Image: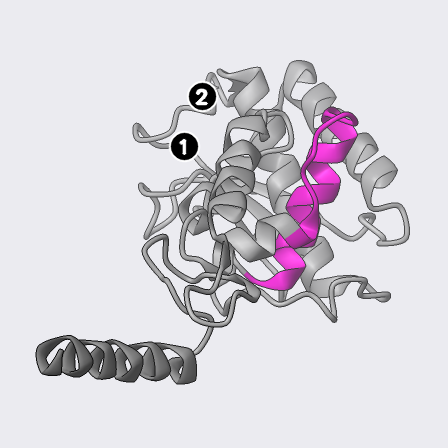
Amino acid sequence: MRTIEKNIVTFSNELLDILQEAYDVSIEIWGDCTFDEVKFMVGNYSGYGSYWARYRAEHQVIEIPLNESHKLLKLKNGIIYPINKVALLGTVIHEYGHHVQRHHKIKPWDDLKGKDSTHSTGSWCWICSTGWKYYFPESKVTPELLAWGVRQGKITKELSHFAPNSNPEILINKVIKLKKAQNKLCNMCGKLFMAKKSNTLFCSSNCRVKNHREKKLINIALKTF
């Protein structure tokens, strides 16, 4: 365990306990993905400030910064101590999730459609859902609901801050409410469809054009009458 300056530091027992808990929980959630090769590094890395930690897939390393933006750890007399235990635990499990995303041998998310960025892919929706289900087994959260919310452009930001010990219910209720609101009957053919926007009235461009033509014919008839 080294900082980037190659100075040897000692992880306090308190910090080691949190890392062990994150490891144990990750095994329980994603047990068929090995975590034994994952290593930790703590230090002041270039580019840090906007995020809490980073997973280096090529080296299987989780880097945690010592900075003023996100106070997770502190260095005192050559020993690293945790500051915010809950946030640190969630952050480490989050990064273990990225390890699963990159190294999982069996990929249950292959048929799940999301988007292209790291925190909105189908794989990440599955990882978030399984993590939350561990902490909140009664939750309505599912990979499909998360992926649908991502495709609507409504929850990508929330998933970038995902931690399994943060409650997903507000987020999921938001998605469910949106989903219900966008189940609509077409104003032309009466077919039930999923609207992309809340003000969409027709299931297709054909129905929209047909409705427009019918209105024109009605207006012409009224003028003639």
In magenta, the rendered stretch is 121-144
Q: Secondary structure at mark 1?
A: loop
Residue 20, horizontal then vertical, whole percent? 77, 28
Up/down of 91 relative to 39, above or below: above
Query: Which residue is farthest left?
Result: 223
Residue that carries the numbered disc 1 in the rendered image: 66
Q: Quadrant of the N terminus?
A: top right
Dots 2 and 1: beta carbons under 8 Å?
yes
Q: Is residue 205 left or right of residue 177?
A: left
Looking at the image, residue 207 sits to the left or right of residue 148; the answer is: left
Mark 2 or mark 1, earlier in chain: 1
Which residue is nearer to you in this view: 35 or 43? 35
Q: Is residue 8 visible?
A: no
Instruction: Tell me the quarter of the picture where residue 136 sits.
Output: top right
Q: Residue at x 63, y 42 (%)?
A: 40
The residue lying at 67 percent from left, 54 percent from top is 144
Evaluate whether residue 131 shows in this view. yes
Which numbered dot is residue 100?
Answer: none
Quadrant location of the C terminus in the rendered image: bottom left
In the rendered view, would you say 146 is above or below 91? below
- Location of residue 138 in the rendering, given as x and y in whole percent from the top left corner: 77, 25
Q: Residue at x 32, y 43 (%)?
A: 50
Location of residue 210 (image quadrant): bottom left
